[in-house]
Structures are given as structure tokens and as C-alpha cells.
Image: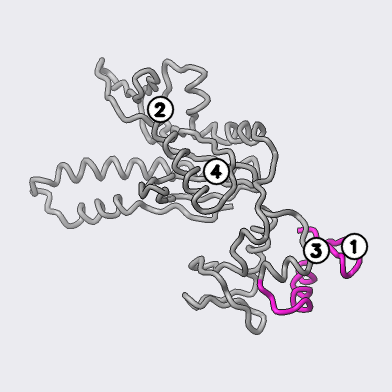
Amino acid sequence: MIKKKREKSHKLMTHEAGMRRVPKNHPKYPILEQEYGKLSYGHKGEEALDYFLTFLPNDNYLILNSLRLEDPKGRYFQIDSLLLAPTHCIILDSKFMSGKLEFDESANQLLRHLPGSADVEKLGDPISQISRQRHQLSLWLEKNGFPPMPIASLIVLTHNNAALIKTTPSITRKVTFHTNLPNRLKEIDENIPKRNILLSNKDLYKSVICVKCSYTPMLRGRGVWGCLRCSAYSKDAHIEAIRDYKLLIGETISNKELRSYLKLPSASITSKYLVSMGLKFEGSFKNRRYFL
């Protein structure tokens, strides 16, 4: 389920504006054009991930695209796609490069062998980069009060004309092609210990989050949920909130727990929402639990 759609980075949009506004005969235009090409290629690589993410092996994944976060030391880092499950999360870093690619772990760099030539283009080190992202994300999670959880990562080659050479078992664990992404995600999912990340109702934002601008809380009035920030309204915004509860807390809920979670004013109103969803339940009235 996509919770944050993919967006162009601020840097890419800045260079797009420059390409529109800077005259082609300007001495800095070639530098601008070269950097724009790199950024544009990178964005194409990220977009190439999206189709294959529709084949996720686990329906419980929340997909957050184009994340830009700040770690506790004030260092910003960007993640192409973050997959969040109740038991773990996975960082995906796309690389839109053609040609023969060699990951040299001893020299900590990526080499691109140019076609029809003995020349080699020396690029950065995606493996070290994604390792830093895992470290920074773990710091961010700790700073924001989340319990420790496994963080996996994959470098995804998204160009159809990319080929890996001189591979090792270590490299194939860290790098995959976008066409094989669903299989690799399934492997990771199966090998992660199936334990909950130990969140409780008190750890979460209460009430309904605005479906348009993500502001919380939406307020309930006359059978609809309204947003104080953007004035959006919805009759069923609570459904998304309950899905989040199922993913993060558990698959059953009581009237009292839902009333607290959605900040509803009474048990009778809460009961109406539960009944309207047609949920199965067990237990007597006071001890009744509903299956989400």
C-alpha cells in the first residue's frame, strides 16, 4: 500500500527550472545540462521501481517513496523507497545505469565498463551509501521513539541494458535487477524473524489522519470527518486509520480501544462504526472483540 507517492527531488526541480531559464549560450549551461541529465536519469530509475513494487510478496508493506529525513546529528539523507512492515523495513536504492557494471568491494567503488572501449568509468560506492542510510535510519527511528527493528536493504538496477560482471555471493545478496525485485523481497520477508515491533495504542497518533494533506486530527461532525488545515472532508477516512491499526497493533480491537484510537465521544457512536464495517466478532457485549 503506497502511503507516500514518488516525487521529484528539490534538486531535480531546481535544475529543470535552470534548463528552462538559463540561455543555452551561457558558459555554465553545459555544467547545468550535465547535472540535470544525471538527476533525471536517477528519477527515471526510481520510477522504474514502481511497477515491480505492485508485486510485493506481503500485503502488510507500507510503501514510502522519495523520503528525505534528518538524523539526530543534523545530517540529511534521502531514500528512494522505504518498505515498512510490522516486523522490519527495507531500503531500496535504484540505479539507472546501462552497460557492464562491476561492484569492486575491495576498492569500494562501482565501475562501468564503457561499450566498445577499454575505458572504465569510476562511480561512487552504492554499497557504502546504502549502509550509511541504514545507520541513519536506525538513528532516526531511535530518536523518534520507535523500538529497534531489523533494517534490510537492496540496490536495484533498473536499466534494461544493465549487466553485472565479476559477481560474488556477497554482491548478489546486496544487488538485484528490478525484474527480480519481487523474488528478492520475498526472500527477505521469509528470513526476517516474525516478531512484532511492540507498538501499542499509546505509541500512535490518535484520531483520523487527513487523506489529502496528512494533518491530524480530522474532526468528526454530522457523520463526516473534516480537516482543519485543508478543509477536506471524508465519510470513510476512519477506514484507513483502522487499516493502520491492524498493520501496527493487531488484528482485533474492542469498542473501548477503537474509541480511544479514533477519539470518538461515546461507545454508541463507536459501535455504529464497527457495525457499519460488517466485522466479525467474538465475546459478549462487554468483552466483545472485532476482527479487522
Compute the Cα span from label 4 to label 1: 39 Å
> Mark 3: which amino acid?
Leu
Q: Earlier in the sequence, mark 3 or mark 2?
A: 2
In the rendered image, which residue does mark 3 sit on? 279
Total numbered labels placed on residues in the image = 4
Magenta part of the protein: which range? 263-292
11 shown above or below 180: below
For image coordinates 46% across by 38% down, the residue present is: 135
Q: Are marks 4 and 3 in contact (CB under 8 Å)?
A: no
Q: Are marks 3 and 1 in contact (CB under 8 Å)?
A: no
In the rendered image, which residue does mark 4 sit on? 53
Tell me residue 176's x, y (percent): 49, 29
> Mark 1: which amino acid?
Gly
In the rendered image, which residue does mark 2 sit on? 162
Q: Earlier in the sequence, mark 4 or mark 3?
A: 4
> Mark 4: which amino acid?
Leu
Q: Which quadrant of the figure has residue 196?
A: top right
Q: 142 or 207: nearer the eye?
A: 142
Any mark on residue 283, and which? 1
